[in-house]
Image (cartoon, grey):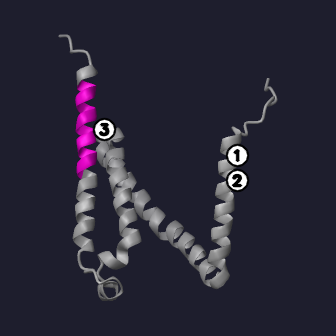
């Protein structure tokens, strides 16, 4: 038998205040964003959703499935998180900084800022290597801790 809720889970007054402030800030940002070219912004959002759902989602779901199968054959499916997280962060950085990483706007960047625009590819590669290296170190530390906590095998 199910009991009806006796108390609504609405949170503390501080949580409610923070939630109201975040909604107010999001509303203000939306009004400011849509004040200029509302049709272009709406078209961009719809296009981004369609590209994500029809192109990106099948790509990274397939890559994740292939990774899970490859590591699942060894019996180490839980290791996939140590590849997923740095890959997702690296892909996010690539998505955000793609024009500069690809060098398409290096001259425009140099004229606007006075800084060289040709170093973004090497920096992105270094950040990606650091993410995967840090993830590998965390995996090794976790495996070491797991082997120390495991009782010795009795023969």
Given residues 49 and 109, the one toward you in this image is 109
Given residues 107 and 142, the one toward you in this image is 107
Residue on which disc 3 sits: 76
Residue located 28% across and 46% down the image:
135
Q: Quadrant of the N terminus?
A: top right
Element under disc 3: loop
Given residues 66 and 131, the one toward you in this image is 131
Residue 49 rendering spot, x and y as whole percentages: 56, 69
The answer to whether residue 108 is left or right of residue 36 is: left
| 101 w.r.t. 153: above or below | below
On residue 58, the disc is: none
Label whose residue precedes the other's in the sequence (2 or 3): 2
First to last magenta residue range: 133-147
Residue on which disc 1 sits: 16
Q: Quadrant of residue 96?
A: bottom left
Element under disc 2: helix
Q: Main secondary structure of the magenta part?
A: helix
């Amino acid at each position: 038998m199910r009991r009806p809720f006796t108390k609504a889970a609405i949170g503390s007054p501080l949580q409610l205040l923070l939630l109201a402030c975040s909604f107010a800030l999001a509303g203000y940002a939306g009004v400011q964003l849509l004040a200029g070219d509302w049709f272009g912004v709406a078209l961009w959002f719809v296009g981004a959703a369609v590209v994500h759902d029809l192109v990106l989602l099948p790509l990274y779901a397939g890559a994740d499935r292939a990774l899970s199968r490859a590591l699942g054959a060894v019996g180490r499916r839980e290791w996939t998180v140590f590849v997923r997280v740095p890959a997702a962060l690296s892909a996010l950085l690539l998505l955000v900084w793609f024009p500069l990483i690809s060098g398409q706007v290096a001259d425009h960047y140099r004229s606007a800022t006075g800084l060289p625009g040709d170093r973004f590819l090497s920096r992105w590669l270094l950040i990606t290597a650091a993410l995967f290296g840090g993830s590998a170190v965390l995996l090794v530390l976790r495996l070491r801790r797991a082997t120390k906590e495991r009782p010795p095998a009795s023969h």
